[in-house]
């Protein structure tokens, strides 16, 4: 059982056994994080186990971190962000702007601003995930290297997240620390004045600073995309489609002229490469060619139905139990030389063929009568639990997951509306943040914006485990009097500094520790220390807590300190040493703008 020793201590007071144990566990934890050979979540679990074994973490409090509001907020926000991304709402809002983004000079400012704005109202990792497909598609269309777009977007998501409580995990955790120190947490928009000033300065820098990044890097996303040519899919115009009465040319324009209408079938008549003036009617069958994302977008906009997406025989499988995969037909496949109808794909194997890509030739015939060849790439839809066995039986080699959305997108404005309502409820102090986002995530599951499996996949479980395990360890450092002790040491280090210098030192300490400790863990450790230091110096803790939040949220120097940086590393083709090129000057801007703004908005001395 830990002995509570959180009362005031003199700067020169000796270190107790409990404090030594707490500091030792924390030091080893930081060392293991920096070593990088063990997963972050495992390191956090080992720290919690060590706390239990040494007695500084009481057994009854060991798992309290997993019931903390922080865990609920982070998990729920990721689910909500995934639903908004899947809904296509962001893509529809960006569509009028995309044709004007023809060069990297216009693409970087537009995407950086969009990600920054989105991360103000949702988790920064979610905001980045929403816009990454847009950026990669734009890069593919215009020939822009993804490396010029993705790192500025990742950094923009961190800057935008500074503006609201739920924008980034450090803000949420610092709010909890403030409640412990002062009895009142930070509210939703308390971060906005300082965060907005830094975000504007960051936007100006990133719009020009992308030139500091290395040229010619080829990311994994670009390589995967270039390896596969356009897909062909078969669609039908239903009676309720907005296309009825419009022409082929209008359909192509709706697809931003990146979709080709290869064949049109009406009643008994077949027309290849139909002219643009042909007027469309209900029941027309169109064979379309294009990228899967572009095909899905057009299918959703035009209200088309995929002919291949039909009952697969036998007992109908619920939609939320199906999945979509992309695979190559191998030479040993029984489908080589056969048609989907002849092979009875739907009736015998329970899968639907949604689209086919064939290298070197266009497909103008209906998919059900198409003779499949070795090397054809197919998009198949079927029951998730059976699909791996089906692919093995058909000798189809599944490709690396590319997030194929054709046949499984659920386009609707409802997820964006639910997110807006949750934000409004929090802003008006109707419900706590955790309740609002938990309710939003449940509602999104009820309306089937996401399936339960997709929701589980959206949650970054290692982050959840890290938070739940480190919260009790952080509390042990505080309850043993460790934070007071460190605050005493720091107060001695800053006693000759002016108040602004002390504030800058705290912010830079958080920036320095975050790449090795993870931003959430940094706040859990430095937050209570900053609060105690402010009280020792006779200053308001609010400014120092804000400095910790900003420093911990602004890791621009490595790919490991924040998951947004890690997320773009592969698709952008970045190396570890690339991050400081853009990140070091941006970090200096954050300190130079952030420290004066904090002092202005949150006076260092309480009235």
Image: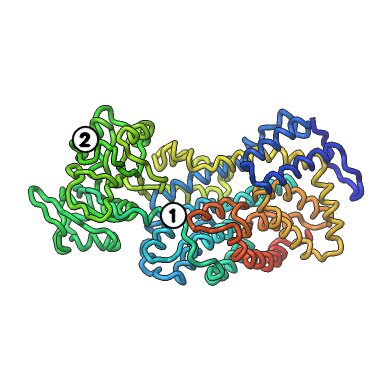
Q: How many marks?
A: 2
Image quadrant containing the C terminus: bottom right
Percent x, y of residue 48 = 70, 35
Please give the residue where the numbered disc 1 appears in the rendered image: 221
Position above or below: 482 against 360: above
Position above or below: 603 against 445: below
Which quadrant holds residue 354? top left
Q: Secondary structure at mark 2?
A: loop
Pointers 2 and 1 in contact (CB under 8 A)?
Answer: no
Q: Name the residue located 46 percent from the left edge and 60 percent from the top edge.
A: 218
Image quadrant containing the N terminus: top right
Of residue 404 and residue 246, the one placed in the foreground of this image is 404
Percent x, y of residue 225 = 38, 55
Which quadrant holds residue 62? top right
Chain-order first, disc 2 or disc 1: 1
- Most extreme residue toward the left, as rendered? 268
Locate residue 254 relative to residue 560 in the image: left or right: left
State the mark number for residue 465: none
Please give the residue where the numbered disc 2 appears in the rendered image: 343
Q: Can the viewer see residue 481? A: yes
Percent x, y of residue 161 = 57, 56
Q: Can the viewer see residue 184? A: no
Percent x, y of residue 150 = 50, 60
Of residue 206 and residue 119, the one placed in the foreground of this image is 206
Tell me the distance, in whole angstroms, between the alpha carbons under discs 2 and 1: 33 Å
Of residue 441 and residue 385, the one placed in the foreground of this image is 385
Q: Name the residue located 56 percent from the left edge and 55 percent from the top edge.
A: 565
Locate residue 460 relative to residue 338 in the image: left or right: right
Which quadrant holds residue 512? bottom right
């Amino acid at each position: 059982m830990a002995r509570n020793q959180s009362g005031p201590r003199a700067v020169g007071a000796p270190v107790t056994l409990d404090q030594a144990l707490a500091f030792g566990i924390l030091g080893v934890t930081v060392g293991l994080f920096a070593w990088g050979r063990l997963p972050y979540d495992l390191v956090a679990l080992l720290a919690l186990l060590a706390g239990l074994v040494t007695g500084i973490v009481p057994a009854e409090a060991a798992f309290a971190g997993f019931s903390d509001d922080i865990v609920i907020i982070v998990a729920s926000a990721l689910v909500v962000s995934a639903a908004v991304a899947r809904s296509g709402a962001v893509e529809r809002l960006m569509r009028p702007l995309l044709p004007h983004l023809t060069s990297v000079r216009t693409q970087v400012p537009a995407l950086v601003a969009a990600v920054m704005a989105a991360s103000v109202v949702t988790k920064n990792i979610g905001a980045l995930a929403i816009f990454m497909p847009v950026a990669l598609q734009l890069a593919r269309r215009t020939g822009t290297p993804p490396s010029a777009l993705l790192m500025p977007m990742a950094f923009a998501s961190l800057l935008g997240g500074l503006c609201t409580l739920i924008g980034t995990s450090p803000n949420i955790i610092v709010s909890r620390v403030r409640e412990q120190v002062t009895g009142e947490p930070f509210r939703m928009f308390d971060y906005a004045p300082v965060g907005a000033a830094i975000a504007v300065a960051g936007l100006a820098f990133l719009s020009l600073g992308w030139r500091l990044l290395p040229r010619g890097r080829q990311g994994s996303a670009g390589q995967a995309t270039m390896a596969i040519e356009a897909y062909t899919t078969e669609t039908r115009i239903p009676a309720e489609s907005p296309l009825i009465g419009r022409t082929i040319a209008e359909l192509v324009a709706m697809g931003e002229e990146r979709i080709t209408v290869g064949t049109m079938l009406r009643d008994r008549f077949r027309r290849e490469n139909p002219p643009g003036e042909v007027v469309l009617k209900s029941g027309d069958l169109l064979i379309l060619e294009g990228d899967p994302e572009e095909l899905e977008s057009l299918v959703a906009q035009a209200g088309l139905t995929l002919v291949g997406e039909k009952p697969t025989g036998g007992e109908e499988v619920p939609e939320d139990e199906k999945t979509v995969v992309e695979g190559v037909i191998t030479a040993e496949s029984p489908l080589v030389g056969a048609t989907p109808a002849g092979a009875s794909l739907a009736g015998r194997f329970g899968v639907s063929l949604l689209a086919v890509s064939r290298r070197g030739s266009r497909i103008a015939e209906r998919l059900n009568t198409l003779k499949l060849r070795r090397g054809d790439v197919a998009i198949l839809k079927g029951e998730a639990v059976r699909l791996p066995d089906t692919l093995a039986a058909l000798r189809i080699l599944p490709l690396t997951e590319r997030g194929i959305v054709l046949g499984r997108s659920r386009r609707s404005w409802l997820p964006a509306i639910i997110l807006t309502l949750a934000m409004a409820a929090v802003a008006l102090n109707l419900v706590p943040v955790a309740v609002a986002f938990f309710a939003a995530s449940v509602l999104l599951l009820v309306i089937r914006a996401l399936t339960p499996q997709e929701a589980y996949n959206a949650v970054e479980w290692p982050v959840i485990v890290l938070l739940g395990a480190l919260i009790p360890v952080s509390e042990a450092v505080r309850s043993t009097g460790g934070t007071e002790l460190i605050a005493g040491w720091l107060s001695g280090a800053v006693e000759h500094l002016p108040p602004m210098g002390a504030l800058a030192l705290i912010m830079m300490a958080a920036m320095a520790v975050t790449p090795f400790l993870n931003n959430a863990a940094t706040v859990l450790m430095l937050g209570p220390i900053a609060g105690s230091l402010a009280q020792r110096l006779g200053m308001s803790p609010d400014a120092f807590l804000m400095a910790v939040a900003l420093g911990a949220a602004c890791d621009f120097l490595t790919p490991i300190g924040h998951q947004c940086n890690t997320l773009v590393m592969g698709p952008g083709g970045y190396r570890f040493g690339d991050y400081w090129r853009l990140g070091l000057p941006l970090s200096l801007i954050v300190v130079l703008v952030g420290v004066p703004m904090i002092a202005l908005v949150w006076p260092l001395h309480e009235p």
